[in-house]
Image (spheres, helix red, strand yellow):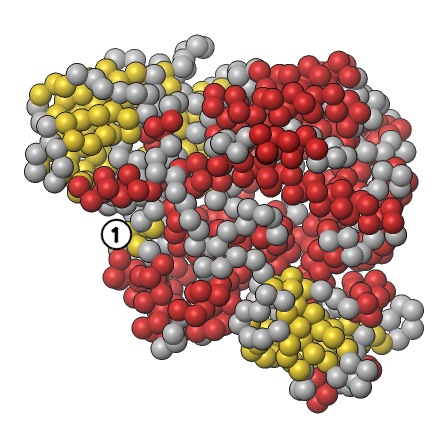
Amino acid sequence: MTSTANLTRDETAARAAGIRLRTVDVEIDLRGAQGPDAATFPTSSTLVFEASIDATWIDFVGASVDEVIVNGSAQPVDWDGARVRVSGLVAQNVVTVRGTGRYSTSGEGLHRFRDPVDDAVYLYTQYEPADSRRVYPVFEQPDLKAQWRFVVLAPEGWEVLSNGAEAAREPVDAGVRVAFAETLPLSSYITAVAAGPYARVDGRWDGADGGGGPVPLGVLCRASLAPHLIDSGDADEILDITRRGLDFFGDAFGLVYPWGKYDQIFVPEYNLGAMENPGLVTFTERYVFRGASTAAQHEGRANTILHEMAHMWFGDLATMRWWDDLWLKESFADFMGAHAAVVAGGYPDAWVTFASRRKGWAYVQDQLPTTHPIVADIPDLEAAKLNFDGITYAKGASVLKQLVAFVGEEAFFRGARRYFADHAYGNTTLGDLLAALEAESGRDLRAWSAAWLEATGMSLVSVERGADGSLTLVQSDPRPHRLTVGLYGLEGDADGRLVRRGGVELDITGERTPLDAAASASTAADVDLILPNDDDRTYAKVILDERSTDAAVRALSTMDDALARAVVWAALWNATRDGLLPVARYLEIVGRHAPAETNAALLGDALSHADAAIDHYAAADVSPALAAAWLETCWRAVWAADPGSDAQLTWARALGAAAARSDGRAGGIRGMLRGETEPPAGLRLDPELRWSWLTALSATGHADAADADAALERDGSSQGRTAHRTVLAARPDPEVRAAAWQAAWEDESLTNDQLDATIAGVRAGGRRDLVAAFDDTYFARLRDVWAQRSIEIARRLVIGLFPASDTLTLVDAWLKENTDAPGALRRLVIEQRDHLARDLRVQAAQRSG
């Protein structure tokens, strides 16, 4: 790929000013995809557009461009690997570009996967932000929408899908030719194709109250996964959530689902959680549960289904003009996923999960030196690729939750209806949305937008207790907040409960706000835990005072409200990351209260944070002891949990993570895997759990290649083969780790998932002693890998193999010597440096403490 592949905002805006795209006809030939060495496919596009310029370019990143025809006349091919130059344009143009595309193994473009279970080949596309040009020639920018007509040639017997409904199918040599109905106007990044012997279950949505339907529904996955998705009944659950969502969004947005059919396909080696291609939504296979699954996993899948469905309006119908306004779709979809899960999806605790997981992601991202406004400055595609982050998604959604409180829920949805009515099938900016919301709410949103959408960072909120019993809410980096301060008191003896004694709801704008109303609910002397943002309505990092922390240590799990517990858990974790709460004390809190945590998402997050605290923030001299103690906590909890419960499964997974760092229970784990000892009653040793435990044994030297091969005999699926790769790479042998490290960088045959598996093995158990010798080589490779590999693969290498050193010397030297490196690469390195600096800073605080 040449540098011209990195499209800029300015040049695409200039192209859009001179082009009015009408239709695109695409034909791709996938009949050769089943061949053992299949690497390329024929592809062509015919673009019909008006032009006020006499020359432009069409985007295509593939193996070759073979023919260019402009208004009936062939032109010499002028292609630099990314841009096909066309000239001689007139007012009305028909341009055809024929070429050869490359199948992908990185999840970018047209991904090709061969299932080791049955040797079947599966294809699917993934484009966001700019990879449709890897599959067919296009104008690769969101503000040049078109009506698309797809024709796909494929092997006979395959499922062949695109955005539109299948319109015709006829036999051709070695396969079939499938034509699809013309779409409504779409941006190129949400066009889609999938093909292969997918298993399918059909359904139908008849419309809310009989209106808007019928819409054909489909749920698809690989044939080898059908027992886990279709035969298990999970597809019925997915169809039910889909119908509920279509009912809700059509009513909420004042426009029924406009895109015809609604297929949802679960695909292998997927880089994202899901993608909102209208009519053909793609999902990661991680949402196909091959074994036991928790309520939190089902809620997470439902949330993602509803998130992608919200995009059918926010993003697909009304689309941002350029990636600066990516939040116009992602922030809204993130908010709507949780909101719809609560009001329509049957998951009343979805905001609890959001408070713990999504906002936790945002808090981490917003404290990096590379943080950015929700409405970001995105000069080019490389910057856009890296802006699918915690700011754009989770902070944006958190801010929208505050906006709904600010303008009122009814006014918010009236504004959304106006926005879609005004901009359906068009492109929009921040101002378009604010105008619609202002018109319906009567509120001036310019100051709100400046404070929340166009600024960086976050407020820290805490409550000061005065000597006279007064309470004062304090915020840094002042912003307008509407929030509630919860007041809790301990009741009973040492086993007492934290009971909510009142709350103060207020609007704040300044640094200090007296809580005079607190006296009417409870005296300050009786308040053991003061919890700012008690209902998690605003976006701010909560700081607990010492007395409140002590109360949480004593009785966190006795609080009745799961959302309030989520805010406390988050505050404690943030305090640990900031070095304010010692790691040992945080582990004490988790060990004491996680076994009693009834919300599966909060439990899972607490356990993963405990593991991360040991891995990142514990000082080297105490880390082994803490790791051993945490392993024992997990071991006891697995045996004590209710048989077959979500808690038992969550603790069993945490046991695998803990056992990778400390081998005190290696014998017991090995005995259960071999069937020599019985696991806890009710615990199903499903494939994922078995591989997790085996990886832990490998990382600590208690499993070898023969054990890995035996496990592969038991589970020869693609997931099993990927896990087998991790187990082999995790063996604590310097030569093994060195070989895996080299393969990650140099073996270009590794798919995206295989690369992740290799990196996971290199990092297993936190064994820095086995890979520290490669620190210098890591930094020497960065520029070359960024230039030579796709951004997705390069990003995984830059992040996944960043040295967890005990010094910043090497990374600081690289940043100083590479000021001219691509901005997206520097951003990744700067972020990893900041994570390392935090680790070292907090570890030093543990030692000094």
Q: Is residue 650 visible?
A: no
User: Which residue is tagged 1?
Assistant: 426
Q: Residue furthest bottom?
A: 520
* In the displayed structure image, the side of residue 46 where residue 350 appears, left or right: right
Which residue is at a point 49% across and 36% down the rendered structure image?
824
* In the displayed structure image, the side of residue 193 where residue 596 appears, left or right: right
Numbered-mark total:
1
Image quadrant in which the N terminus is located = top left
Please tell me how crowded label 1 is: few (under 14), some (14-19), or many (20+) other residues with Cα within 10 Å. Answer: many
Q: Nearer the viewer, residue 716 or 412?
A: 412
* In the displayed structure image, the side of residue 611 where residue 415 appears, left or right: left
Which residue is at a point 61% across and 52% down the rendered structure image?
367
Which residue is at a point 80% across and 65% down the rendered structure image?
549
Q: Nearer the viewer, residue 403 or 675?
A: 403
Q: Nearer the viewer, residue 787 or 545?
A: 787
Mark 1: secondary structure: loop
In the figure, 817 relative to 777: above or below? below
Residue type of the residue flagged with mark 1: Gly
Q: Nearer the viewer, residue 808 or 785?
A: 808
Which residue is at a point 81% across and 82% down the rendered structure image?
467
Q: Looking at the picture, how far across and down is residue 184, in whole percent?
A: 24, 45
When asked about the image quadrant of residue 599, the answer is bottom right
* In the displayed structure image, the side of residue 764 where residue 747 appears, left or right: left
Q: Looking at the picture, how far across and down is residue 683, in whole percent?
A: 77, 40
Q: Looking at the picture, how far across and down is residue 278, in whole percent?
A: 34, 44
Q: Looking at the picture, how far across and down is residue 18, in whole percent?
A: 17, 41
Q: Is residue 487 visible?
A: yes
